[in-house]
Image (cartoon, helix red, strand yellow):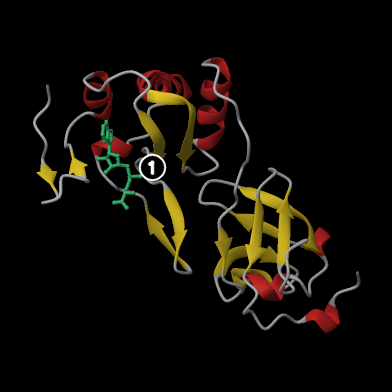
Amino acid sequence: MIEPYWQSPDRVATLYQGDCVQVMRAMPRDSVDVIFADPPYFLSSEGGTTCQNGKRVEVKKGEWDRKRGLAYMHHFTGQWLIAARRVLKPEGTIWITGTQHSIHSAAVAMDQLGYRLINEIIWCLGGGTNVYADTAKGVGLVKIKDLAGLDHKSVRLWNGEKWTQLLGVSRTARAGNELTITLRSGEKISCTPKCNFRTWLLHW
Ligand SMILES: C[S@@+](CC[C@H](N)C(=O)[O-])C[C@H]1O[C@@H](n2cnc3c(N)ncnc32)[C@H](O)[C@@H]1O
C-alpha cells in the first residue's frame, strides 16, 4: 500500500506522489472513473527551441522531459497506459494532453492496448496569440487572426523544429465566428470567438 501524500479532511480527495506506474499498480483493478494525464512531451534537447508568448525560447524543462527518441517515448507511454488500463473501469474515460511530438505515440499505444479513441481535441488559442511565421513579408511574429487575411499558399509556420505549410483558414461549425487554420502536418489552430477577426479580407 502506498502512503497518501495528502488527504482532504472529508477523505473525498487523496493525493499520491510517486512514479505513476507504481502508484497505479498499487490501486485496485477497475476502480477509476476518469484519468487525466499530462505526461512529458520529451521536447527538451540541446539547442531545441519553441515559441513561448511570441518569443523564441530554449526548451529545458528537466531530465524527465529530455528527448530520447521515438522508441523510448513509445515504451514510456505504453508502460503507464498499461497501468492505467488496468485501473480504469470498463466504462471509464481517459484524457491525455500532449504536443504534436508526443500525442501520436499516445494514440498508437492506446490503439495497441485496446483503448477506444473517441476524440482529438485541439487547444483553442486566442486570435491575438503570436505565431512565428514565414510570410510574403518575411520571417517574424504574426497574430493568428492576421493569418486569415494572407494568401495561405505563401504562409508557413515554425513549430520550434521545422516549418509547416499553412493549408487554409476556415470557419468552424461552432458559434461565434471562430476561425481554424489548418497545417499540412494535420494540426489545427482555432481562434476564440472574442477575436476581432479581419473577416472582410476573407472569401468564404
Ligand atoms: C508535462 S508535465 C505536467 C505538468 C503539469 N500538468 C503542471 O501543470 O504542472 C509532465 C510531468 O510528469 C512528471 N513525470 C514524469 N515521469 C513521471 C512518472 N513516471 N510518474 C509520475 N510523474 C511523472 C514530470 O515530473 C512532470 O512534472
Which is more toward the observer, 116 or 9? 9
Left or right? Give the position of 177 relative to 19: right
Which is more toward the observer, 76 or 116? 116
Quadrant position of ligand 1:
top left
Which is more toward the observer, 109 or 200? 109
Residue appearing at x 59%, y 46% in the figure: 162
Residue appearing at x 63%, y 35% in the figure: 118
> Mark 1 is on which residue type?
Asp
Give residue 174's quadrant in the image. bottom right
Left or right? Give the position of 10 relative to 106: left
* 184 up-or-down from 198: above or below: above
Which is more toward the observer, 105 or 111? 111
Q: Secondary structure at mark 1?
A: loop
Residue 58 pos. (x, y %): 36, 54
Residue appearing at x 72%, y 80% in the figure: 197
Q: Is mark 1 within 8 Å of ligand 1?
A: yes
Residue 192 in view of the camera = yes
Residue 85 pos. (x, y %): 42, 21
Residue 43 pos. (x, y %): 40, 41
Mark 1 burial class by Cα count in 10 Å: few <14, some 14-19, many 20+ = few
The residue beneath circle 1 is: 38
For the C terminus, which image quadrant?
A: bottom right
* 99 up-or-down from 83: above or below: below
Residue 84 in view of the camera = no
